[in-house]
Amino acid sequence: MKLHDVNQGIKKNKKRRRIGRGPGSGHGKTAGRGHNGQKSRAGWSQRATFQGGAMPMVRRIPKRGFNNKFALDVFAINVSQLEKSFEDGDTVSPETLREKNIVKQQSYDVLKILGNGELSKKLNVSAHRFSASATEKIAQAGGSTTVLPGKAPVVKGQKKADRSAE
């Protein structure tokens, strides 16, 4: 193979295939759909899991684990990360965390501050939840914690009306 043969025959802007424009187009009459059968009909579609009538892979593979679709998506951040990223006297909130690119996740339901690491700076922290050790460490450093309103966790046996009162 020679260097000038590498891209030979490759078209950068390939012309769109015009379907059903008569026999002279090369894609006329049946418009590239063959003659008869299910795929030749208008509106034909097939499930993504369909495997030619065989038992689908999705149904053959054993299922394991549990997925709670009602669970809140909690983004947790440690006190040690706040120590690195913020200056003394700063305000920490979901907005400031996103501005400083600490929160890389696009969306979450709840922001929780955890107490792993040390904190020496006085910070005013606003979040939906705090661990007991995080609250203690922020208070020891002279900072304050503000609990933001958010989606309340569903407690088994608690009615919807009871949750909205909180």
Image: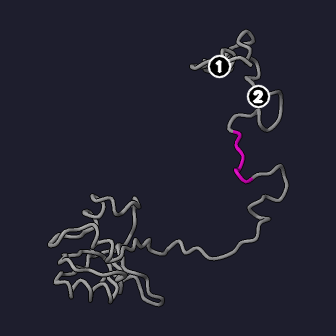
Residue shown at 58%/73% (left/top)?
67
Magenta-colored span: 44-49
Residue shown at 66%/14% (left/top)?
4
Quickly name the residue at label 1: 7
What is the quadrant of residue 7 in the picture?
top right
Is the residue 158 above or below the residue 49 in the image? below
Amino acid type at circle 2 is Arg
User: What secondary structure is the magenta-colored segment mainly?
Assistant: loop
Q: Position of residue 20 (x, y in %)?
A: 69, 19
Observer-nearest residue: 134 or 22? 134
Quickly name the residue at label 2: 33
What is the quadrant of residue 26 in the picture?
top right
Report if the CB atoms under discs 2 and 1 are less than 8 Å apart: no
> Could you classify mark 1 by the number of other residues whose Cα lies within 10 Å: few (under 14), some (14-19), or many (20 or more)?
few
Q: Position of residue 130 (x, y in %)?
A: 32, 82
Is the residue 42 above or below the residue 16 in the image? below
Split into 4 quadrants, where in the image is the N terminus? top right
Q: Position of residue 70 (x, y in %)?
A: 49, 74
- Is residue 99 highlighted in magenta? no
Amino acid type at circle 1 is Asn
Split into 4 quadrants, where in the image is the C terminus? bottom left
